[in-house]
Amino acid sequence: MNLVKIELTRLRWRRAALLILLAAVVLPIVFIASTAWNTRPIGEGDLADAREQMEMSQQYAQEDLRNCVEHPGDYGIDAEDPDLDTLCRQNTIFEDDVSNYLYRDQLTASYALEGPGLAIAVFVGLLALILGTTFAGADWASGSMSNQLLFESRRTRMWLAKAAASVIGGITLAVAGLALFWALYAGLAAIRDVPLTGFGDEIGGQTLRATIFAGVAALGGFAVTMLFRSTVASLGLLLAGAVGGTMLMSVLPFDDPERWMFHSNATAILLNGYEYYPRGEYMCEGDCSDVMLHISLTQGVVYFAVVLAVLSALSIVSFRTRDVP
Amino acid sequence: MSEMVIETEGLHKVFRTRRGTGYAVRDLNLAVPAGGVHGFLGPNGSGKTTTIRMLLGLAAPTRGRMRLFGRDVPHHLPEVLPRIGAVVESPKFAPNFSGRQNLQLLAGTIGVPATRVDEVLETVSLGGRDRDRFRAYSLGMKQRLAIAATLLKDPDLLILDEPTNGLDPSGIREIRETIRELGGRGVTVLLSSHILAEVQQVCDSATIIGRGRMLASGRVDDLIGAGTTWRVGVPDPVSACGALTAAGLTSRVADGRLVVETDAPESVTRVLAAAGIYLTELVAERADLESVFLQLTEGTSLDDTATRLTEPDTTYDEGGAPA
């Protein structure tokens, strides 16, 4: 426990850790500002703009209709057709509903959970990953790992203490970022008189899952960096793994590549399940439940648990056996 | 026989690079008795640092046995490590932390109270710069901080790898005095260095290695062989050399000078006088560690980084001298 305290102090003193924590606090403010703007109430000015756009659209439609009558061949209509005028009118869209020009996201809890709430959870997870990576990488870059081992030679203990500090750091920044986001969101909803009643469990559940996910991301970043002994190499490898792995999965002859991709399983954890179209199908009409494939929360958790266990085992074995420069 | 603080038996370290396989240490049998300052001498790349890194658990030996304070390491290293302070190669600390912060973290790791940090900072005269970032320190200050870190444990064994590198003359003197003082207090000091004068001035005993193998080991005075070489001034060194050799004395002419190796200098005057050769001078030439070192490591490049298995092997007799 003493060693974990020391590693937490080391993490707290690192400038990179403070910058990442600062980013975790600034991001929710940016996201809420963006959400507030995207869901702002429709005012007289917006209505006037919408009407103007509708009138312009109607003018274009009139021109289009004239063109159609004068050059029906361009529209695939026979010039000798006795119903030429009717056919051209059917071919032209006359927009007369101003609400079609007033589309705006609504500030609802479900919008927040799947929109900015999901985005902030992903960003906080990425920040936690970078935190774990830089925390381990700094020790290798400075060479101070060997000096630390002259004071604590039990390498597994040291790995575990540093890993614990990374996880605690990741969770801390997730709690800070997510709590601030939802507090600001609740404030915005209150100002707009939008009720959040009934969504407490969903918001709490997503926040809890995102927080645990951030801890896992921090541990993953730490484990990979302890394996490769370089922040840059580890981040590069993780990026290459995410992008290259997705591309590889896409070209390999798997029936269901989406099932094994990082982003699908991460979304399944953060959104308590994830539905997607099977390979080669991009849309369906009506009841799609038979067509859509599903990754459950449990499947997402098992996926990341296996990945993390393999990474951690490799990382510990490597740290225990390889010479330390 | 005094207790051995450091012992190695058949210690061997093979490494692999893109250019092939080589060895850093070969069948090294090192024995450092308790108390005093023991020099660990060898050219660059001779295996000194690798040996130290293996003893401290930073590198795994390919084969061989190591003991510290009579305990097998690395298996029992956690038990003996609290008694060991060490600086391996250049000082390595977190560059953005202050000297004090770096020491506080290390002290916390072994449960040493914060007041000990103040004490060791004062001991190495870093008290006024302890809150500066490590990256802003001069090389000398970094070395002093590294020594301060070793003192956090109040060690029984101090392993110092080239501790005076980068220090100015006054810094070097301070470190030497500190080493002597610690040795005098009963702390066993293993001083790894390629600076021969440093080892000769500070150490009671020394081990000389080259190409990963032990070449000689013993008390510094024994290694030097004090008073056994004499420079003899005569008008005709070649004739005098012949007379001395005929009388069974070991002599040679080097750079036009007659040199005789004997513990009985009076026999030189007697033999030469009997041959009608009269001396103009008879001067004891005390060999220094440098000549011993150069003789033992002859053919070992100071810039050799390692010995390749593909290179012609140098063989050594049982006493460690080149055959």
Image (spheres, grey):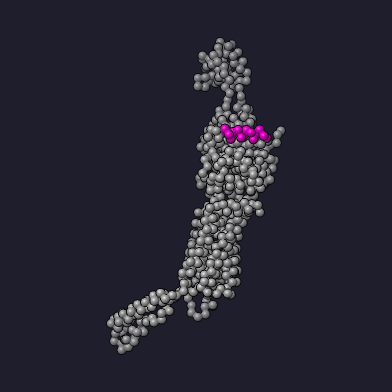
State left or right for residue A252 relative to residue A156.
Answer: left
Q: Is residue B132 above or below residue A71?
A: above
Residue at (70, 40) in percent of width and height: B70
State left or right for residue B89 relative to residue B154.
Answer: left
Residue at (57, 22) in percent of width and height: B285
Asked if the stretch drawn in magenta spans residue A7, the answer is: no
Which span of residues is magenta-colored? B172-186
- Residue A86's image quarter? bottom left
**Residue projecting furthest to the bottom:** A82
Which quarter of the rendered picture does the C terminus of chain B lie within? top right
Q: Is residue A83 above or below residue A281?
A: below
Q: How many discs mark residues in the rendered view?
A: 0
How far across and down, in percent of the image, does residue B45 sit? Answer: 54, 39
- Which of these two is toward me, B247 or A123? A123
- Residue B36's image quarter? top right
How far across and down, in percent of the image, does residue A235 sit? Answer: 51, 57
Q: Is residue B48 visible?
A: no
State left or right for residue B1 relative to residue A134.
Answer: right
Q: Main secondary structure of the magenta part?
A: helix
Q: Is residue A12 above or below residue A45?
A: above
**Residue projecting furthest to the right:** B1
Q: Is residue B266 visible?
A: yes
Residue at (63, 54) in percent of width and height: A4
Residue at (58, 38) in percent of width and height: B125
How far across and down, in percent of the image, does residue A214 sit? Answer: 57, 62
- Which of these two is toward me, B120 or B140? B120
How far across and down, in percent of the image, does residue B106 sit? Answer: 61, 47
